[in-house]
Amino acid sequence: MIWSDAQIRAWQALELGPRWQLKVTLQAKQAEVSVVKHWEQLRASVASCQSCALARSRQQTVFGSGTVTGQWALIGEAPGAEEDLQGEAFVGMAGQLLDQMLSAMGWNRHKDLFIANVLKCRPPGNRNPSPEEISACAGHLSAQLQLLRPKAMLVMGRIAAQHLLGQDVSIASLRGKPQSVRIGSGAEAFEVPTLVTYHPAYLLRNLEDKAKAWEDLNSFADLLGRT
């Protein structure tokens, strides 16, 4: 249990209970505050980022959405026009389809997962991100994933998959095969079980592949259950 500041002060004033329990409670509280502070700092860093030319054409950055305490992360490619306007990942028609896909699996984007893109700014005209833009933005996503420490990741779209897996291959050759993504470096690095599938924007243009995406979601549910 994480106590509120008022509860901790009352405990100290009344001198109740064993001292070790209060110490553990204080340590947990301090850890919680530290994590929140790191998220706030990271959000501010993304909002003020000028690392590439996209900073001059964006309406606003798209940090990510959902919960930072969920068990898994969904990673897409880059914000589109609606995301650029609203500052939220996966909105518009692609976002509506994603919500339907998540709901069909019994998942809620606000309660169960964190959603982010490889890029935090929209490329003009929704073009594919350049390698230089992806490189400039890579540190933000890495920092998010290091704070999240997700048990599993669902990666949507070729560009996101190629960046995270470091493989220049197609979605067709990756989907259905559990992958592993290394997050961080040195002693703090960890591996995240990962599954790749089609981006909702792609599915809107290629309806025949929706059945394959449904298979991928069920495979990911199995992967998440195993983790």
Image: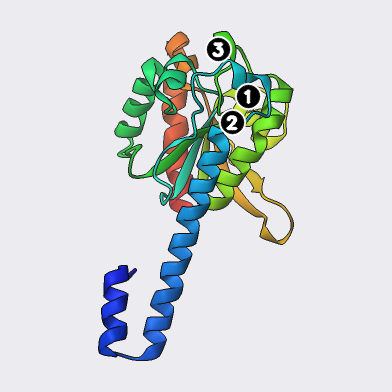
Residues at marks 2 and 3, CA–CA distance in whole angstroms: 14 Å
Kindly identify the residue that appears in the image at 54 percent across and 52 percent down.
147
Q: Is residue 185 left or right of residue 214?
A: right
- Element marked by disc 3: helix
Residue 114 locus on image (x, y percent):
44, 41
Q: Toward which corner of the image does residue 52 lie, by quadrant?
A: top right
* Label at residue 159: 1
Residue 47 locus on image (x, y percent):
53, 33
Colouring of the image: rainbow
Residue identifier under label 3: 126
Q: Is residue 79 left or right of residue 127?
A: left
Up/down of 207 relative to 55, above or below: above
Q: Residues within 10 Å of mark 2 (few under 14, many from 20)?
A: many
- Residue 165 in view of the camera: yes
Up/down of 28 relative to 21, above or below: above
Viewer-proximal residue among 7 and 218: 7
Viewer-proximal residue among 9 and 210: 9
Q: Nearer the viewer, mark 3 or mark 1?
A: 3
- Residue 176 in view of the camera: no
Q: In the rendered structure, which amino acid carries the disc numbered 2?
A: Val
> Which badge, 3 or 1, is on the more N-terminal residue?
3
Viewer-proximal residue among 157 and 22: 22
Residue 44 locus on image (x, y percent):
52, 40
Q: Toward which corner of the image does residue 171 lie, by quadrant?
A: top right
Quarter of the image where the N terminus is located: bottom left
* Label at residue 118: 2
- Element marked by disc 1: helix
Q: In the rendered structure, which amino acid carries the disc numbered 3?
A: Asn
Up/down of 193 relative to 213, above or below: below
Residues at marks 3 and 1, CA–CA distance in whole angstroms: 13 Å
Q: Do the residues bearing badges 2 and 1 touch, measured as CB atoms within 8 Å?
A: yes
